[in-house]
Amino acid sequence: MAPQQAYRIALSVVLGLVGCRELNPEFIDAADLTDAEGEASTDAETGPSCADPAQTVCDGLCVNTELNINHCGACDQPCFDDEVCKAGSCVPDCPGFEQSCAGECIDTMSSLEHCGACSTACGAGEFCVEGACALDCAPPNHICDQICVDTATSSEHCGECGHACPGERVCVNGSCALTCQQGQTLCGDACVSTDTDPEHCGGCDQPCADVCAGGECVGECSDPFVVCGDACVDVQTDALHCGGCDQACFSAQQCEAGECTCPGNKTACMDGCFNTNNDPGHCGDCETECEPGQVCAQGQCQ
């Protein structure tokens, strides 16, 4: 079980009687958050309400609890920093080369327990090589902790066995590097949006006195920008606020016309971007998972 998953369960047991708001005290005060849809209207008889029936009033704002990372599933139920909210549940925001299996991000290209797809285990004496069980671990792969890995790309064994990349860094050509998702820029040791970040407006280390919109310092937000937290964002293109404030896309996705989409020939599924032509965990569509021992070819389990 992942440490954060265990932490979430422990907190829910200990704090179960004090309400969901206490689940993550870091996010107790969400009253200063804004949403692209605006504030809720109030009726003297019925109380606060939203024009869109799909939205819920949380802290005086209309939010989509199916997608909002600060109100996921219900008001004041925030996701962790490395999670996104999909269908009202917080799920891991796994890198493009990993897949969420039972709440953990797994490299299904090398995992013995999840080879090619979740819960597809290799037999005794076998290795998982490029998502398929094999008897040999051929070069340029190396055997690290009984697992066949490519040390040029493995974040757990980057450059050599046992050398794990810290934090959000990934392994690129045998070296740990911090990569930013589309639309973000690496400033120092953090990924930021220079279109909206008031500390890095238009470029790294270019602070604004007020707010940043479209890479320029402005006094206030104007169409098509809306206020999300302390930034002016275009919810039609911003991957962290796609279609509304705090509605984040997976790191492998991009935001187009207010919808999270995938690059190239990949399909947007609830757990990321996948090539449904050859992915055994999403074969032909997002829901179809091939049986153990099968492969996915041209969208069919074989």
Image (spheres, helix red, strand yellow):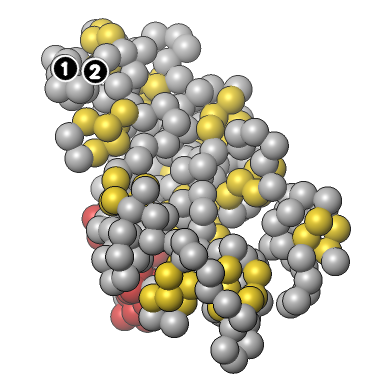
- Looking at the picture, how far across and down is residue 108, in whole percent? 56, 66
- The amino acid beneath tag 2 is Gly
- Residue 301 at what x, y percent from top left? 83, 64
184 displayed left or right of 132: left
For residue 16, which numbered disc appears in the image? none
Q: In which quarter of the image is the C terminus?
A: bottom right
Does residue 110 sit above or below 232 in this rendering?
Answer: below
User: Which residue: 36% across, 29% down?
Assistant: 184
Three-letter code for the amino acid on which mark 1 is drawn: Gln
SS assignment at label 2: loop
Q: Is mark 1 on a helix, strand or loop?
A: loop
Residue 128 lies in what quarter of the image?
A: bottom right
Q: Which of 84 and 267 is in front in this view?
A: 267
Q: Which residue is drawn at 30% across and 65% down?
A: 160
Q: Is residue 247 above or below residue 109?
A: above
Observer-nearest of 67 and 124: 124
Can residue 74 be seen here? The reply is no
Q: Mark 2 points at which residue?
A: 203
Residue 289 is left or right of residue 233, and the answer is right
Task: Give me the C-alpha separation between circle 1 and circle 2.
Answer: 6 Å
Q: Name the residue under label 1.
A: 206
The quarter holding residue 117 reads bottom right
